[in-house]
Amino acid sequence: MKFVDEARIEVIAGKGGNGSASFRREKFIPKGGPDGGDGGRGGSIFAVADRNINTLIDFRYARLHRAKNGENGRGSDQYGAAAEDITLRVPVGTVIYDDETGEQLFDLDHHGQKVTLAAGGQGGLGNLHFKSSVNRAPRQFTYGKEGEQRKLRLELKVLADVGLLGLPNAGKSTFITKISNARPKVADYPFTTLHPNLGVVRTSASRSFVVADIPGLIEGASEGAGLGHLFLRHLTRTRVLLHLVDVSSIDPDIQAIDKAVEDARAIVNELQKYSQDLYEKPRWLVLNKLDMVDHPEQVKEEFCQKFGWTGPVFAISALNGEGTQALIWALQDYLDQEKAKENQKEDEKALDYVPEDPRFDQSRQNIDEIE
């Protein structure tokens, strides 16, 4: 599954309609008084997270989004119509930044979440609002306010449950091909993965999880070396990381084990340099390519000892599938528990949540400004 994970757009909300300065003029009704209506509110632009969308590709071709202006007020107490709003549907996991300042504005991390990208301008007030005992024929009115205008950068952080880590050629692409429906390029040379790949792992008719494979990391990745640093941000939303280590060269050779341990530590160091949160995320060790090792149990034991690893460890062969089923079921059970905890927290937050109305009456505020 390929996807566009970044896009730049410009949003321009509509201008509010002008208020009207009008007086009632009808036969046999002298001094009819002011009857100018208010201008309509300009259209606003919203963004809503939609779990049915998985890419930002539409925004690569439609970069300018402009809402219509509100109608002007008219006489006979006629208010101008408000302009229609525009709602942009984006994938869940989209982070929205101000493209000029770099400030993060919104993080749409759950389905249905809605935010205001650019608020429409408030309509102006008609002269009927300025009538008083000392001003029987007011000619004051206000102009509609300009709508907000912004240049935004949309960035999609992949909402995968499991993220794969490892050096180039650690077997990540082979692994995700074996356990899921993803079909990334697989070859016997480094950097065959040039973009993230997503795969759905289905363990039953009602249970599944998503795995993300990013380009292999090398030492210095957090500072821009290789390709993996471009996609490390996609791992920040995963619930667990699988650190794949190629142990095909260990048989068991002390020097070879030392080199494999050194490489594995380099990956962990890059995680810590890039993000402390990513470094502290739950991480499982997966020793891959055991089909090429004569003494797999000995290799597993010695590697974990030298690496100082006390967490979950699995020995597999992504090529022939050995050990992968046990790993898949362990992941599914772990993820089910984590999702149950998250759902409970969301339900508790929902009980305390009071939605804000983006449209609020500013008439009193506008009158105060005139006065």
Image: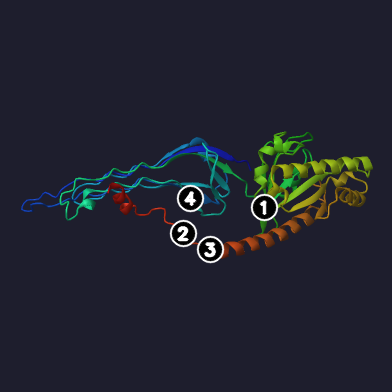
Checking the image for residue 350, the label placed there is: 3
Checking the image for residue 114, the label placed there is: none
Q: Which residue is mark 1?
A: 161
Q: Amino acid at mark 1?
A: Asp
- In primary-sequence order, the first of circles 2 and 1 is 1
Closer-to-camera residue (72/166): 72
Q: Which residue is mark 2?
A: 355
Q: Which residue is mark 4?
A: 115
State the image coordinates of residue 79 (x, y, percent, origin top left). 25, 50
Query: Mark 1 Cα within 10 Å, few/some/many (few <14, many 20+)?
Result: many
Q: CA distance from mark 4 to mark 1?
A: 25 Å
State the image coordinates of residue 209 (x, y, percent, origin top left). 67, 54
Q: Is residue 268 above or below residue 327?
A: above
Q: Is residue 210 above or below residue 9?
A: below
Q: Residue at x 57, y 65 (%)?
A: 348
Closer-to-camera residue (88/371): 371
Q: CA distance from mark 1 to mark 3?
A: 23 Å
Question: Residue 293, can we see it?
Answer: yes
Q: Amino acid at mark 4?
A: Val
Tag 1 near tag 3, CB within 8 Å: no
